[in-house]
Image (tube, rainbow, N blue to C red):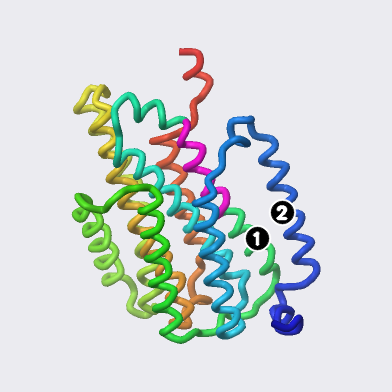
Amino acid sequence: MSKKFLLEDPALNWKTFLRVIGVCLAAYLFMNLGTQAIKDYSDPAAIAIIFVSILVICGVLRIHNQAPVAPIMYALGTPLGLLCVSLGVWAIFWSWDGDAGIELLGFNTTLILLPALMGGAVSGLGYLWMGSSTQQMPKSSWRVGIFFALFLLLTVTYIFVELGVSLLGWETEIALILGLIAIVSFVSSSADAWVKRVAHSTMFVVLIVAFLGIIDLAVIGANTGYANVSAYAGGMSKIYISISTGLVVYLLCIIWSIAAGAFDDIDFGKLNWHLIEAFSLIVLITISPPSIYHFMS
């Protein structure tokens, strides 16, 4: 691959690489601000899932039609990180085992949440690489879109294998989410491309599911006198598998929008931001880090 080929992307220049070095240095300093507990934990599998997926998708598109890699990183990094987190949390409550589950929760929470940081770092790098570039995303062939869709589904399958979980018994929740996305997409404005309607509908459904899940947890707590942890864990499992399903559909929308030539028509940055808001809320409600009051009680 020639040097000229790499530098044809206006976002790839020496200023970009200086920015990348700056972001990496900032990330290192931020990590050193954390406690020793954070420094001692790492999750190679989650890191590999995020970075290998980004590398494969960006590399294939770059070779296929010289697509700019920065917007792809910006769009894909955050939802990939959130998907790893969501499936990780769901796996904990999927195999909840009473007191043993409570003891493992604190240990695993750090490992679970780190992929969100990794995905956000990838999106941040993509944002810095884009700068003020206005280069449009070229349309790819439908074969490339199918390849990426299959690759994404294989990646999700690998996550399930790594976590040791199964979708058996959760078909109802998955079907409900897919049905809601389909209905909301159907009633959306027909003037927009179908992939844009599905992407916006998925974001809307994930937001609604997050709020409904919080209400459901409150009802479970009230009905059980806040004493049945297993019932609460079951409620959280429903929330996270529903959100995970929505995130998979959303990621499929991102990669298929490139094949459909609609990538530039969708503001994935704004959609990602709304997904972060909803996900942050549900994480703070369900597995928030301890406050000073926990240590004082």
Q: In this view, does 249 lie to the left or right of 12?
A: left
Q: Which amino acid does label 2 sit on?
A: Val
Q: In this view, does 10 lie to the left or right of 204?
A: right
Disc assigned to residue 125: 1
Please tell me whether residue 170 is drawn above or below residue 137 in the rendered image. Answer: above
Q: Which residue is drawn at 27% across and 72% down?
A: 186
Nearer to the camera, 20 or 148? 148
Residue 67, x across and y down, in percent: 59, 80
Q: In this view, does 152 lie to the left or right of 212?
A: right
Please tell me whether residue 197 is drawn above or below residue 179 in the rendered image. Answer: below
Q: What residue type is labelled 1?
A: Leu
Res 41 quadrant in image: top right
Res 284 quadrant in image: top left
Alpha carbon distance from label 1 to label 2: 7 Å
Please tell me whether residue 32 is drawn above or below residue 77 in the rendered image. Answer: above
Residue 48, x across and y down, in percent: 53, 56
**Residue pushed farthest top?**
297
Instruction: Give the class, few, some or many, for how many residues have Cα within 10 Å of label 1's Cα (few <14, many ≥20).
Output: many
Q: Residue at x 61, y 72 (%)?
A: 69
For residue 200, say whether it is visible: no
Are the residues at dot 1 and dot 2 in contact (C-beta closer than 8 Å)? yes
Disc assigned to residue 23: 2
Residues in magenta, as a range: 107-119
Q: In terms of secondary structure, where does tag 1 sit?
A: helix
Disc assigned to residue 238: none
User: Is residue 61 inside the magenta stretch?
Assistant: no
